[in-house]
Image (cartoon, grey):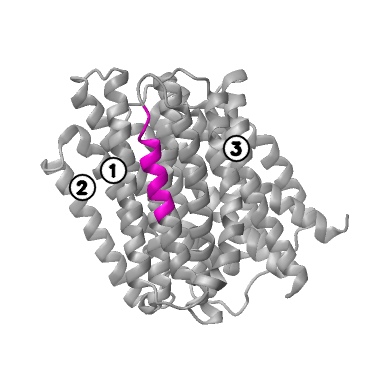
Amino acid sequence: MDRKGAALTLLCVAQFVDVLDVNAVVVALHTIGRELGFSRADLQWVISAYVLAFAGFLLLAGRVADLWGRRRTFVAGLALFTGASLLCGLSVSPGMLVASRAVQGLGAAITAPAALSIITTIFEEGRERDRAVAAWTAVAAGGGAAGLLLGGLITDFLGWEWVFFVNVPVGVVGISLSYVLLPEFQDRSASRPPDLLGAATVTGALVLLVFGLTRAEEAGFGSPSTLGTLALAAALLAAFVVVERRVAEPLVPLGILRSRGLVGAGLVAFALTAATAPVSVLATLYLQDTLGYSAAFGGLAGLPLSLCVVAGAAVGGRIVARVGGRAVMAGGLAVVAAAALVTAGISADGGVPYVLAGAALSGLGLGCASVTSTARGTSAVEGDKRGLASGLMNTAAQVGTALGLATLLTLAASTAAQAGGGTPDAQALVAGYRLAFFAAAGVASLGVLAALCVVRQDRV
């Protein structure tokens, strides 16, 4: 293997670990919640803290990599991710784990764009670079499937802490090899500082929005604390818009949002993750909480989703030239809605076939629509803005995950508490899960409308 191949392998391993960790944590959630004492509504913060930090700083990190140096940024992000993984495994309270997960998400946000930038630097444009980027992307899909399987096995045989501890030796070796295998690159023409204020305001707005939605279960949606938190989130979001209008190098140039293709594709990406992520998490909790299956079985039950995402992506790529991107996105979201309705067939006595069938359908719809929305969103703008468009699409998907989890897990928990009189039994838990699945179908249906009404009828 030459030096380029070794460098690509190192970057792919870092990407693999990032993605693997996300799905492994989903499978371990039930055990984490039981052993650390999370409430049902607060359990989503184990995932939301990660994805919010990732979404809020992803675009900023790409800018920092150009200014500070791509290898240096990659190493810093990997070190932060590795240290945070150690703290996650050592956590003794919900607060400590959530804070560590936020730092871990920040590390992943710093690492991902730097790694992709290094790939585009060391591989020449054309077939060589296309193959390298394809390998880096394929590793992400493999990491998702492996995370479900390995997360369950690790949780059952070693304990949930080792879901995080396994990242530590990989990170240490990766940091050491970075100085040997990766070249440094710095954009000397870039002189203006990155938009730190923009990143801080938009991330703060998202955190407060998710916090307000989560707290609504205890305090009520009309309570002063909930309304105050949501109002502060809105104020920070408005501040973000003001900052982006005035700063010399904005995190998100607002003019790019005039593109209907980009906005429509972003709404599709948002709806896809807002509908699929909560269903996946709740189905895993259902299998372990209600039916008493092991974490390993929960991981195996999630494999149809990961495998069918790959199949759906292949199908979407083949049919998009025939029917157009808008139809593929709308059709994929319709399949996701149908998948949520199928999963709602569960009961307190059993429902594994519904979970498996729903996961397979969800994967097919997600694969079809996500690949098409990414292609449609990035091709909707000029060539020099496609990197920014790609980052916005990724951010929309991460925000959809966080808001979907906050809203639907809170809905499931509050419904179960009301049905069970404060101490939900199996029947009450299933009632909460089913209502959340119906809501997910509604979110996906709204995504269908966004695809049909916002995206123009043309080919990808």
Quick one: quadrant of the N terminus?
Answer: bottom right
In which quarter of the view is residue 171 placed?
top right
Which residue position is annotated with label 1? 211
Identified at 44% across, 75% down, the residue is 249
Q: Do the residues labelled 3 and 1 touch (CB within 8 Å)?
A: no
> x, y (%) of residue 437?
34, 40
| Region in magenta | 334-346
Which residue position is annotated with label 2? 229
Q: Is mark 2 on a helix, strand or loop?
A: helix
Q: Are marks 2 and 1 in contact (CB under 8 Å)?
A: yes
Which comes before the other along the chain, label 2 or label 3?
3
- Would you say the magenta stretch is mainly helix, strand or loop? helix
The circle on residue 126 is: none
Q: How far apart are marks 3 and 1 (CA)?
A: 27 Å
Is residue 278 rendered to the left or right of residue 301? left
Which residue position is annotated with label 3? 147
Q: Distance between the residues labelled 2 and 1?
A: 8 Å
